[in-house]
Amino acid sequence: MTDLTRFRDDFPIFQHTTYLNSCSLGPLSRQSRGRVMTYLDQWERRGAANWYDVWWAALEELRTRYGALIGARPGEIALHPSVSSILGVIASALDTTTRRRIVTTTLDFPTVPYQWLPRDVDLVLLESPDGVSIPLELFERAVNDETALVVTSHVYFTSGAIQDIAAIGAIARRHGALSVIDGYQGVGQLPLNAPASGVDFYCSGGLKWLLGGTGVCFLWANAETTHGLVPSNTGWFAHKDQFAFDPRSFTPHDDARRFETGTPPLLPVYTQLGGLDVLEAAGAEAIRATTAALTEDLIAEARARGRVPKVAANAVDRSAIVMLPSADPKRDVARLADRGFIVDARPGHVRVSPYFYNVVADHRAFLEAFTDD
Ligand SMILES: Cc1ncc(COP(=O)(O)O)c(C=O)c1O
């Protein structure tokens, strides 16, 4: 297995804490800090003049590199500040008068159903039998010819279970529905070829496994299946000729930028470019192999200490989100933080997520420190 420990020095946080919380927020790299300093220098020295060369190019660079990360062609990526804003734009492009049904699940991040609860649609929220994943048969049963959209996660944020997104996309397509995959917990820790998956949309962002921090997300839109959609929730970045400043007509971009809205926040663009520098140097397959090995060791060590992690039954379906039952997760997380271990609390569990820059000693020391008294 490729040794990725050399990347640990790129993350100053490891000098003083044991960081095991990449599924909440990826740590800051030297590369991101360097990129941000460059951006601030540009802003200070040239102000708006930067738009016409370096900042416009940075947006294009980010779309291209996000695309390359998931095997997508240029022109298939739209930039957004959050997954919520992406979902809102997609929702605004659908005709839910003829197809009223939206299928999602109770394991998805709540911002997914929140897009639909206030709308006049038939929302189907699939319940998980085990709190870990949603069997494909439940999607099969719920999706019908009245379904406009199936929207669910690549990896469930409360269990780390990996979903078969190709199968979910195929179920949607069989019924003429579109599929959206919330990949915020997927790509980065998992290699991905989005076009090969057969889904219609895949979104993710910088916050977690992509090491880009807050405020920068992307939407991959399958050019063949989503080209005809015109969101009503839009903005001038979606206009094919935005610098014509024509208030009388709106012509959306031919490519995925039709799903963008307004001016993207630039500082996160730069933090994300720095995060991608690290990820590209480490390599997606090596990241997955290293992270999976750490995860399996964490699960085995936790079990050896009598804990019962809530994770998928088979290793192949597991990702680097390990839920350890806790009577008082908030208290445990605060106490662990006092001792230099950064993990997270979710209802009933302490959530631990190793990544490629972690080492076995990190989670073993964490398990020693994680006591029930
Ligand atoms: C699976 C998943 N989707 C979405 C989000 C966040 O969505 P937004 O970008 O709208 O804050 C998170 C966590 O922050 C998440 O874990």
Image (spheres, rainbow, N blue to C red):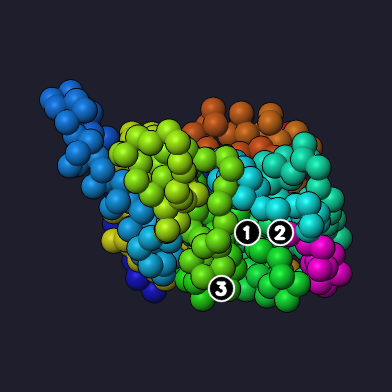
Amino acid type at mark 3? Ser
Q: Which residues are magenta?
A: 137-149
Determine the residue located farthest toward the top in the rendered image.
Answer: 44
> Where 39 falls versus 167 (above or below)?
above
Residue 113, given in percent of the width and then of the height, sits at 74, 45
Residues 247 and 12: in front is: 247
- Label at residue 197: 3
Quarter of the view holding residue 147: bottom right
Residues 238 and 173: in front is: 238
Q: Are marks 2 and 1 in contact (CB under 8 Å)?
A: yes
In terms of secondary structure, where does tag 2 sit? strand
- Label at residue 149: 2
**Residue at the disc numbered 1:** 180
The residues bearing labels 2 and 1 have C-alpha atoms spaced at a distance of 7 Å
| Residue mark closest to the camera, 2 vs 3 | 2
Quarter of the view holding residue 267: top left
Amino acid type at mark 1? Val
Q: Residues within 10 Å of mark 3 (few under 14, many from 20)?
A: some
> Any magenta on residue 140?
yes
User: Horizontal placement of 61 versus 178: left or right?
Assistant: left
